[in-house]
Image (tube, grey):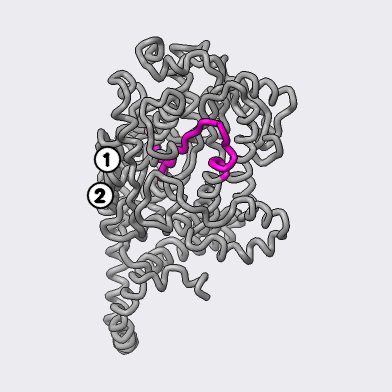
Amino acid sequence: MADIGIGSSEISEWYRNKTIFVTGGTGFMGKVLVEKLLRACNIRRIYLLVRPKKGVEIRQRLEDMLNLKMFDNVRTEQPEMLQKIVPVRGDITMEGLGLTDEDEARIAEETEVIFHAAATINFQEPLRVAVNMNMLGTKRVVALAHKMSNIKALVHVSTAYGNCHLTEIYEELYPAPIDPARLIQLTEWFDDEMLEAISPKLLAPRPNTYTYTKALAEHLLVNDSGTIPYSIVRPSIVCGAWREPMPGWVDNLFAFTGMLVGMSKGVLRSLYTKPGIALDFIPVDIAINLMITSAWNVDVQKFRTNGDQIYCCSTSSQRPLTSELVAEYLIHINRKYPLSSALWYPDGSAKYSKFPHQLHMFFVNIIPAYVIDGIFRVLGRKPFAVKLCNKMLKAIDALEYFMIRNWTFHNTNVRSLYDALSPVDKDVFNFDISQMDWKDYFETYQLGIKQYILDEPADSLPEAKKSMNRLYWLHCIVRLIMMYGAWCIVSSDTACVLYSSFFHGASHILSCAPVFVAAEDSGLLENPIQDL
């Protein structure tokens, strides 16, 4: 694919000698975007907004990024393309993006295409931080775009869950929950304590600051854009690569990747979801190809939308992936491609009611974490297990909202845009999710995690399978010991009296189970903290 962009692809030809400005280019999606632009589009230059991080200067951050394995194809076949990336020091949380006057003038004069992908994806971010990054960051990018005399397209990366209070979502701009300018004023007037107090009222019915501020960022873009041509791409939960830059590529433990690693390691052994729920995951290369194509279409108008150029990059309407299928594929990949670093045999299961899930987490995760930390303290070593367990529980709680609800994301614009492409562009910039095989994808995903996150070489698989067999038999032995211990307890006379009293009381509780289930299904028990 190294020379595909030269003449044979309409999209690649459109990008020829164009200058691109990218925010969020050092993030997961940003890296894949930069790699694809270098490999498949003969661009003139990419200005990459980079902020110094933990004392590492921007050129060193760029060098570290380009040394990643995902850039091997470019480095081997088109090494000259790597010289076309120009890092510029800046920050979307600062006025004027933190650019120097010289950098701003140069970017404004040369740039023709903007990809705005920078954002905070932390669901638990304080409102002030989320507003500054997701909303004001967008406002600052649009302000810079107005200074660009040759701007052809601005692609704004949003989220499919911006309107998650609805169950059926179309590719259109929905009414804003609040005037974006008013919310920005509130963050300027109120202190952190006041903002924290009013946040639940502001966010409802959305679950967190991420979905709330991303929805409002779309309105800021539309309101401030003026004559700037733009498109909005709304990916669902972005996961490892399907095919590009290499199958299974992933470089973080965010969202579903972290859950997949936790379950494969045998640490996360329970998942709260609902039967038949369609979990909407999108491979990162599908989203990137759609972004690149949408910028081209903004200018050439090969496909004309009825309204704003909004594209929902999701799978639920074409390739639905149910919670039952996910559980089936998890069992399959852990047997076929087990992790060498597994801590216990991964036999976790999905729970369709919250109480059994919480009970399971308490006995299997929380109690063992305290026991391990207690042992470490006795040995004079630094405890770690409780802190790690709490982080895992916090991450699971943040995802729970998305694991127990069903959405229908309509993607008519995405399908129509793909249909409008030439055969070559359908191959080079493929974002047709209907071609995916989920079982094959999960295998690829697991291998990508082993190789790119856990640094487990391919030749370690036979040893990993042996280790998994040992963990399986150890798991069986422990279960037998626990069952024997339980039998010894219940066989004593005193225990029989105690257990009789316990089960008598439990029977009364269980008789109320249908009431609790009905209450949970109606939503009354989903957010008890807020109700209080």
Residue 325, numbered label: 2
Q: Measuring 35% from the left and 36% from the top, which residue is drawn there?
A: 414
Which x, y percent locates residue 161? 43, 50
| Label drawn at residue 32 | none
Residue 70 makes an appearance in the image: no
Query: Quick check: 275 left or right of 384?
Result: left
Residue type marked 1: Trp
Position of 159 with respect to 345 (left or right) is right
State the image coordinates of residue 368 (x, y, percent, origin top left).
46, 62
Within 10 Å of the Cα at label 2, are there few (<14), some (14-19), or many (20+) other Cα atoms?
A: some
Q: Kindly indicate the quadrant of the structure image that contains residue 191.
A: bottom right
**Which residue is the site of mark 1?**
438
Of 529 and 430, the residue lying toward us: 430
Q: Amino acid at mark 2?
A: Leu
The stretch of residues the image draws in magenta is 220-241
Q: Against 33, is 510 above or below? A: below
Q: Quadrant of the N terminus?
A: top left
| Residue 232 among those drawn in magenta | yes
Crowding at dot 1, Cα within 10 Å, few <14 / some 14-19 / many 20+, comes out as some
Tell me which numbered mark, 1 or 2, is placed earlier along the sequence: 2
Q: Quadrant of residue 101?
A: top right
In this orientation, which residue lies closer to the viewer: 161 or 139?
Answer: 139
Q: Position of residue 344 (x, y in %)?
A: 37, 52
Outermost residue toward the right in this view: 101
Do the numbered discs 1 and 2 sit on residues whose CB atoms are within 8 Å? Answer: yes
Label 1 to label 2, Cα distance in Å?
A: 9 Å
What's the residue at 44%, 39% (across, down)? 308
